[in-house]
Amino acid sequence: MSEDIRRSIQEVAQAIERLDRAFEKRAEELRERGDTEELGQWIQAKAAMRDSGVIYLSWARHYAKASLPGEEEIREDEFFEPTSG
């Protein structure tokens, strides 16, 4: 895999991590306010965004790997380590 592709995938993974942290910060604000209805909706949105990011990165790694015959296998956790929550 080219260094450009590798670096781009890493940047996307980092952006997804930042977005997840921002969503978690918002969820914490809602918890502190006691807004359980909006918190429930926000937690679902956070999970959906996180899952979508995992899928997006999986396909990016798949296509990057498939683009060069004989390319070494990419470890599943090389670019993205899912967190719970």
Image (cartoon, helix red, strand yellow):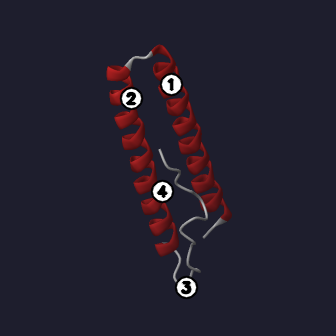
Please tell me whether mark 4 sits on a helix, a strand or a loop.
helix
Q: State which tag comes first along the sequence, 4 or 2.
A: 2
Give the residue type that dot 1 points to: Arg
Q: SS of the residue at dot 3? A: loop
79 sits left or right of 84 in the view: right
Q: Which of 8 and 16 is in front in this view?
A: 16
Q: Compare marks 2 and 3 and give the one earlier in the sequence.
A: 2
Q: Label 2, secondary structure: give it.
A: helix
Q: Distance between the residues labelled 1 and 2?
A: 8 Å
Q: Which of marks 4 and 3 is nearer the N terminus?
A: 4
Q: Disc 2 or disc 3, which is closer to the eye?
A: 2
Which residue is located at x 39 percent, y 25 percent? 39
Q: Mark 3 points at which residue?
A: 70
On-image quarter of the N terminus: bottom right
Task: Give residue 26's mark.
Answer: 1
Q: Distance between the residues labelled 1 and 3?
A: 44 Å
In this rendering, the label closer to the viewer, 4 or 2 = 2
N-term-proximal mark, 4 vs 1: 1
Which is nearer the eye, 3 or 44?
44
Q: Label 4 to label 2, Cα distance in Å?
A: 22 Å
Q: Do the residues labelled 2 and 3 touch (CB within 8 Å)?
A: no
Q: Residue sitting at 57 percent across and 80 percent down?
A: 71
Task: Point out the frontmost of discs 1 and 3.
Answer: 1
| Residue under pointer 2 | 42
